Image (tube, rainbow, N blue to C red):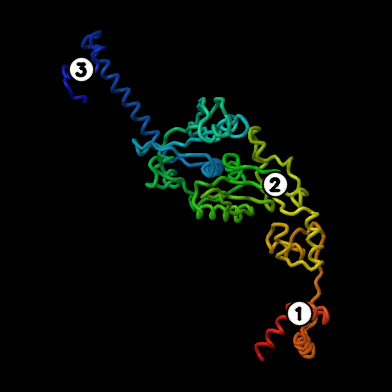
Amino acid sequence: MFDKKENEIIEEFNQSLPHLSEKMNDQEKLDHYFLMLESQGKNWLKNIQTFNDDKKRIFNNKQEQIFIGSMLGDGCITKNYQNNSACKFTLTQSTMDHKGIDKRSYLEWFGKEFDDFNANISESTRKPSGLVKECGTKEEYYSYTLTTKTLNFWKKLEKQWYVPRTDHHFFKRRKIVPDNIKLTPLTLCVWHMEDGSNNQIDGNVELNTQGFSIEEIDFLINRLKEDLGIQSKPKKSNEQFKIYIGIKSYSDFIEMIKPHVEWDCFKYKVDTSGYDKVAQIGEDHSQAKLKNKDIDKMFKLREKGWMQKDIAKKFKVSKTMVSRTLSGDMHKHSGKKLETTRKPRVTKDQKLEIITLNEQGMFQKEIAGRLNINQSTVSRIIRRSQCQG
């Protein structure tokens, strides 16, 4: 471009910037033209430097833990489909997440941790729609979105956390769980803050993983156990699955992440003031099917000779529950256990007596009572004698 003749440069300037060319003489046009070239050169060098820095960019240890937790939660790597190389990380929180509690302090903390990625927070006002509207919310509410700078670095991570999809008219990709991630208390904390629920009365936690496949959920359940010692299982939610952490690991889960919760807006997610271990036993449990008086009555009915299936029908529970309750395997808090003594084996003389009494017309129940043996034993011996006869 520098070998152009001066008149060609002036002509190009007149065509490109007619609003300026009218106010300048030819020398001013030439000076302005070369200033523009110098400025473009500086910007080009700056872009080259940014590209080289981007290639060397990596997370520090804390950033990696936070990022994994957020990607398992509400975090997202947005992609510009018009410019395939343009990706950035975004995280949105609103005041409607839990009774209007403002989440800006959490995003401000997040932004400081990722300050070297030029993270900034934007604020917008939203009108209730979808599930928010269905819950009865009528007033407008604030929504905050943290956004980082667009970098090639995010494009590499986007390929690890997303796969294309063709089964939806709008969504072109699906978030997945990479098979090389590990969970730490900080990772678990961020995950729970963004996509977990603390059910303190019942003593359990649910992690909303409905967007992941059952195979990915099984992988996360295994990571919870192997990396953190947390017992969990899948819980069906419509046609998808959540991760359920029950009472066995509830206290360990809360105590593990509590030291990392430094945001007042999320204190409710580790609050255990409404949790009472005693209330998780017996009739005080929120999902208890039998009251203490029902258990007492169950034992009395069994002592009167009621069959287990009849007891189950009366209390509208399974026969297995009746059997385990009577044996002391369930409802141990009652301290009750049905003592059963195994009756001695029937002798040959008793078998002959059973057959004789039956031929004389005595009922099986009466024979069992007379010989102090089970009625089922009497019935079995009579059937065998009839078959052999």
Residue drawn at point x = 39 percent, y = 40 percent: 170
Separation of marks 3 and 1 at Cα, in angstroms: 116 Å
- State whether residue 100 is above or below residue 223: above
| Residue 3 on image: x %, y % | 18, 24
Q: Nearer the viewer, residue 189 or 27?
A: 189
Picture quarter with the C terminus: bottom right
Amino acid tagged 1: Gln
Q: Amino acid at mark 2?
A: Asp
7 vs 315: above or below: above
| Front: mark 3 or 2 | 2
* Quadrant of image for the N terminus: top left
Residue closer to the observer: 161 or 129? 129
Q: Considering only vertical position in the picture, is 338 above or below 375?
A: above
Say the numbered circle drawn on residue 202. Answer: 2
3 or 1: mark nearer the eye: 1
Q: Residues within 10 Å of mark 1 (few under 14, many from 20)?
A: some
Up-down relation of residue 346 to residue 14 (above or below) = below
Query: Residue 349: x, y in percent?
Result: 79, 90
| Distance from Cα at disc 2 to Cα at disc 1 | 50 Å
| Residue occupied by mark 3 | 15
Whether the residues at callouts 2 and 1 have beta carbons within 8 Å, the answer is no
Image mark for residue 364: 1
Q: Secondary structure at mark 1?
A: helix
Q: Quadrant of residue 189?
A: top right
**Local crowd at mark 2 within 10 Å, few (<14), some, or many (≥20)?**
some
C-alpha distance separating marks 3 and 2: 75 Å
The first of marks 3 and 1 along the sequence is: 3
Q: Secondary structure at mark 2?
A: loop
